Amino acid sequence: MKILIVEDEEKLNHAIVSGLKSRGFAVDSAYDGEEGERLAREYAYDVVVTDIMMPKRDGVTLCKNLRDHGVTTPVLFLTARGALEDKITGLDIGADDYMVKPFSFEEFVARLRALARRSSHVIIGDTLALDGLILDTRTQEVTADGNRIVLTLREYGLLEYLLRNQGAVVTREDILSQVWDRFFDSFSNVVDVHMKNLRKKLPPSYAKRLETVWGKGYRLA
């Protein structure tokens, strides 16, 4: 799952990004509303999290502009403004959820997952499955025919993305954009290395279904 954090308070921005990455999320961040809007329109995210009071462009304007340009990515306002009229305004202009600072990080993560499940391009439910290969997005546990598989955060993110797109060919660029952040070197062989490691950890019956489509990318058949 890939998240955009738009928060002008540097320490809080870093803390949120660090916390999400430690839970296996791919995360980009911005420190003002103008940059946040640019990223949200340029890249595909599962959820955009934005403060309201920010330099250059406030969160309400950011959200309204995204909706006016046809961007349907779920938006969660994370703000110190907790008055009822602020919540109503935010939801009325197209936000999907609203949290007030200070906040519980576990609740925040749960809300991100709930928003992602409701978005049209994400599979509904807490589990993704391919026969007996099951990934629980809530606990981040992966099992194959009842046996637990221990994966690194990147391997987990890679498998999650493949399971969400099973049957479809995904390019290396697709994988980099969804499992890594936007600053990663697209000419690196990091995807191939992690794919090789993932195949080694999966039982043979599932590893052989992780196909290399030469000249295009990969497919979980």
Image: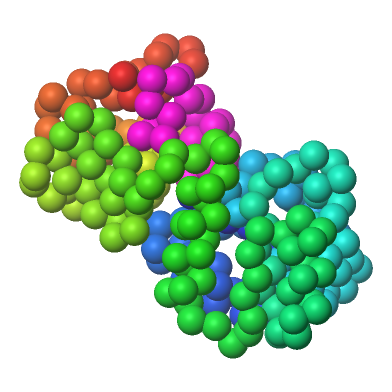
Give yes or no for residue 60 being in the magenta stretch.
Answer: no
Q: Position of residue 90 (x, y in %)?
A: 77, 67
Residue at position x 57%, y 38% in the image: 120
Where does the magenta region start and end? 162-187
Q: Does residue 139 sit above or below 7 in this rendering?
A: above
Q: Nearer the viewer, residue 43 or 182?
A: 43
Q: Is residue 20 above or below residue 25?
A: below
Image quadrant holding the C terminus, namely top left
Q: In the image, 161: left or right of 135?
A: right
Toward the top, the furthest residue is 214
Question: Residue at left 47%, top 57%?
Answer: 113
On the picture, is 38 further left or further right than 3?
right
Residue 108 in picture, x, y percent from top left: 51, 71
Number of on-image labels: 0
Residue situated in front as seen by the camera: 160 or 125: 125
Residue occupying image coordinates x 12% and y 33%: 203
- Residue 160 visible in the current orientation: yes
- Rendering coords of residue 98 (x, y %): 65, 70
Q: Colour scheme used in the picture?
A: rainbow
Extreme residue toward the right, this view: 56
Left or right: 81 in relation to 179: right
Q: Residue at x 45, y 65 (%)?
A: 110
In this rendering, position of residue 206 left or right of residue 172: left
- Return the x and y of residue 109 as percentages of the image width and height: 47, 67
Query: Is there any visible trace of residue 151 in the rendered image?
Result: no
Vertical side of 55 occupied by 25: above or below:
above
